[in-house]
Amino acid sequence: VPAVVPGAVCHRGVTYVAREGYRPLLMDVHVPLGATAAPCVLWIHGGAWWSGDRREQPSNWRRPGVLFSLLVEAGLAVATVDYRLSREAAWPAQYEDVAEALRFLRAHADLLRVDPARVAAAGDSAGSHLAAMLALRGTGPTAVQAAALLYAVTDLRDFDVSATLSPEELLASPEGLLMGVLPDDDPDRWTDASPISHV
């Protein structure tokens, strides 16, 4: 993964939150050269909530690794974020982390040279689920003005193989690890974590 995006001022490895008992969560911000208040895309990586990091871009594109460069070429800043993975913390930790990333971006908008009034959330797969949750639940400093969802998980309660899994297998699935509890044991928790419930 390239550490520097061509045509951008790159702020790499910025700690946006340090929660007691967890690793510091990092952000990279790539701002087009010469920009003074660039619209910003908050990129949230995929990885089934249990793997990945802020530097990852969709790997199944014909030109892997091109997303951040394309955003910068279009005059947009891109902030890429780590969040607590499901083996580190259960839901809603992941949502809390990406919401905190938005707060950080806005609080440091002048220094980073991004426009706090024009922020979008985007991601792929699990990251797209989190971007959807920001778009549907965010308010004030955690609101976004747009969202781009790449193959988003929209309903955690309705995934194809859940009916064929034993309770143990379901808890070990990406969705089960994220939630930390079976759907029947806490249906409200699963409903609240599903973007479709907030439309």
Image (spheres, rainbow, N blue to C red):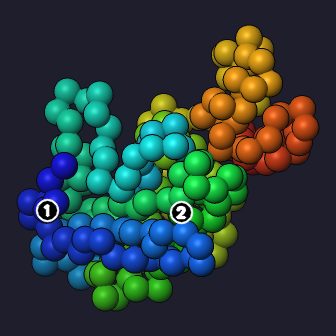
- List x then y, in percent, for residue 89: 63, 56
In the rendered structure, which amino acid carries the disc numbered 2? Val
Q: Is residue 88 left or right of residue 77?
A: right
The residue nearer to you, when weighing 171 against 129, is 171
Question: What's the residue type where badge 1 is placed?
Answer: Val
Q: Position of residue 79 (x, y in %)?
A: 35, 64
Which residue bears the numbered disc 2?
98
State the SS at label 1: loop
Answer whether residue 130 is visible to the viewer in this image.
no
Report x, y in % for residue 78. Answer: 31, 62
Mark carried by residue 4: 1
Q: Residue furthest top?
A: 164
Q: Residue at x 45, y 39 (%)?
A: 47
Q: Is residue 118 above or below residue 46?
A: below
- Determine the residue positioned at 49% across, 51% down: 147
* Image vertical order of residue 49 relative to residue 91, above or below: above
Q: Secondary structure at mark 2?
A: helix
Between the residue at mark 2 and the residue at mark 1, the CA separation in whole angstroms equals: 22 Å
Work out whether residue 23 can be spotted. Answer: yes
Q: Is residue 173 above or below residue 43?
A: above
Q: Are marks 2 and 1 in contact (CB under 8 Å)?
A: no
Q: Is residue 90 rendered to the left or right of residue 88?
A: right
